[in-house]
Amino acid sequence: MIEVKDLHKAFGAVRAVDGVSFAARDGEITGLLGPNGAGKTTTLRMLYTLMAPDRGQVLVDGLDAAADPLAVRRRLGVLPDARGLYKRLTARENIDYFGRLQGLPEAELRARREALVEALEMADIADRRIEGFSQGQRVKTAIARALVHDPRNVILDEPTNGLDVMATRALRQFMLKLKAEGRCVLFSSHIMQEVAALCDRIVVIAHGRVVADETPDALRAQTGEANLEDAFVKLIGSEEGLAA
């Protein structure tokens, strides 16, 4: 479980994150939505300890990210906005490298790597260098790398960005599998069809603040819109009006 409590982050005079609070629960997929510049990526970077908040707290399975960032990282599997793969290494070598950084014993690392290669249907690319991979192949490798240490909490920043239809479908099924295993899955996306199909709960951020934190059905009821995209636009529009 990931808990965010009153997070603040400013860059000079710009308040990128201004008191964000929400919880992403085990066995659920939580969507983090917002227009460009809303503070989503800054929030995610604070969750996975890449960036320290000016104020507030992040708890992962009850552990404080500021007090024990190393322990928190062990409990997180992260697909960041920058995928961070080593192009001269093969897919298997990338996975192995990150597994060793996590301190996995070699036998466990091999078993975890091969299970992920199978689950993500990577057998045909596992021994190829990353250089020259398609976007979908890079995302698969980055997800395998993020999950090799078997984390209970998974953060995915726009995981289907740039993927074709078949790769997107496969990734959605994999996310549902993670949920079925009882993991906490938190992901950001701009694709409302994807959010509607996957999310148990949706957190909407605008101007660095949470403007909604509900189930998809509750968001539609709250806004009086049958379509989730229309509900999102209404929420963001009302927030823009308040901020004007």
Image: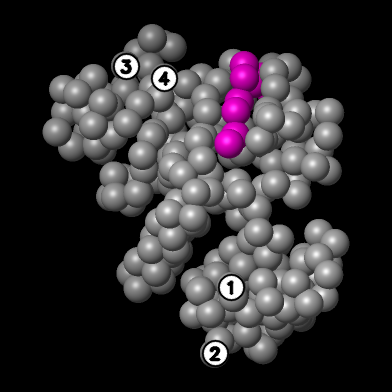
Up-down: is 79 above or below 37?
below
Residue 98 spot, x, y in % from top left: 77, 65
Q: CA distance from mark 2 to mark 4?
A: 44 Å
Q: Which mark is residue 124?
A: 2
For badge 3, the amino acid type reads: Ser
Element at label 2: loop
Magenta residues, start to end: 1-11
Q: CA distance from mark 4 to mark 1?
A: 37 Å
The number of numbered badges drawn on the structure is 4
Residue behind mark 1 = 116
- Of labels 2 and 4, earlier in sequence is 2
Q: Is the C-beta separation of discs 3 and 4 under 8 Å?
A: yes
Horizontal placement of 12 versus 172: left or right? right
- Of labels 3 and 1, earlier in sequence is 1
Which of label 2 and label 4 is nearer to you? 2
Quadrant, the C terminus? top left
Residue behind mark 4 = 211
For badge 1, the amino acid type reads: Leu
Residue behind mark 3 = 238
Q: Is the C-beta separation of discs 1 and 2 under 8 Å?
A: no
Q: Is the C-beta separation of discs 3 and 2 under 8 Å?
A: no
Element at label 4: strand
For badge 2, the amino acid type reads: Asp
Name the magenta segment's main secondary structure.
strand
For badge 4, the amino acid type reads: Val
Q: Report the residue at 24% width, 37% height from top.
A: 228
- Of labels 4 and 1, earlier in sequence is 1
Residue 223 spot, x, y in % from top left: 22, 21
Up-down: is 88 above or below 217?
below
Q: Report the residue at 40% width, 45% height from top.
A: 190
